[in-house]
Amino acid sequence: MSYNDDNLYADQAASQPFRFDEKVVAVFPDMIKRSVPGYSEIIQSIQQLGSYYIKPNSNCYDLGCSLGAASLAMSYGNQQENVEIIGIDNSAAMINRCKNNIEGYKHQTPIQLLEANIQDITIENASMVVLNYTLQFVDRALRASILKNIFKGLLNGGILILSEKIKFDDPTTDRLMIDLHHQFKRDNGYSELEISRKRSALENVLLPETMPEHLSRLSGVGFKTVNCFHQHLNFASFIAIKS
């Protein structure tokens, strides 16, 4: 399947709040590659962790599955029998493209796709759950209940992988990481105008939190093993293991 280069914010008319609509879906792989430091490494880690943590006769969930990269990574990593991967996204445009994407790759594990809000899904019999840059788009008041639902539905020994854009309590560090992230985007061909417009579009849509806030919430819902296993600038990934 072909996708376009991301020039959405080079358009003078691009001034609306960010939405995962058809326009974003059409450029999403290029957008992620040029905007999220370390994204490919996280997808590779999901595959590797899948080979360790996916159990036979269990479910795996990709919450906010977008075009299915994490779902496919779990499928490639899975070495067990009778496993189903369930990808969930509330964007109809994403789900429609994801179905075509999934069908275009050779993989062994069945992947079911559902159009739904992740807060409305009951997690059941899960050995692995992925929240890959998803929670940051959910109202902060709902985040703890979503994680509680995941914890409840995980099997003992099951793993949650949570990736998020983060902010920092220290203003100097926060400003530095924002500046370095903007330089990352410049290095990937985005103009100052595109960077500024996208930041405006994401304001009040993407709501980042600090690393201590994420770690505390994960511990608070019941996870005993909680750690950051990857950080690149102001993007971090956490593992939380149920025991």
Image (cartoon, grey):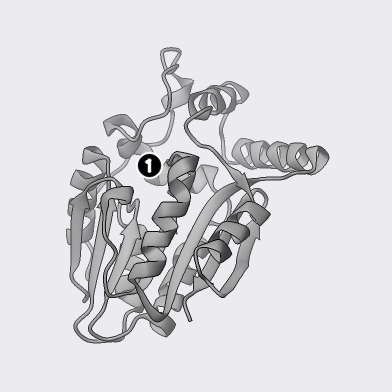
Q: Is residue 152 visible?
A: yes
Number of residues whose C-alpha sits closer than 10 Å to that of mark 1, classed few (under 14), some (14–19) or many (20 or more): many
Task: Kindly identify which residue carries mark 1.
Answer: 28
Kindly identify the residue that appears in the image at 53 percent across and 22 percent down: 197
The quarter of the displayed image where residue 62 is located: bottom left
Kindly identify the residue that appears in the image at 36 percent across and 61 percent down: 149
Q: Does 186 sit left or right of 138 as displayed?
A: right
Q: Does 232 sit left or right of 124 as displayed?
A: right
Q: x, y percentage for residue 160? A: 45, 68
Q: x, y percentage for residue 200? A: 54, 23
Q: Does 92 sit left or right of 137 as displayed?
A: left
Image vertical order of residue 174 relative to residue 121, above or below: above
199 or 102: nearer the viewer: 199
Image vertical order of residue 156 relative to residue 86, above or below: below
Image vertical order of residue 144 relative to residue 55, above or below: above
Q: x, y percentage for residue 73? A: 36, 68
29 or 235: nearer the viewer: 235
Q: Residue furthest right?
A: 172
Q: How many marks?
A: 1
Kindly identify the residue that appears in the image at 30 percent across and 32 percent down: 21
Q: Residue furthest top?
A: 12
Q: x, y percentage for residue 106? A: 22, 70
Kindly identify the residue that appears in the image at 61 percent across and 64 percent down: 230
Q: Is residue 133 visible?
A: no
The quarter of the displayed image where residue 209 is located: top right
- Three-letter amino acid code at disc 1? Phe
Q: Secondary structure at mark 1?
A: helix
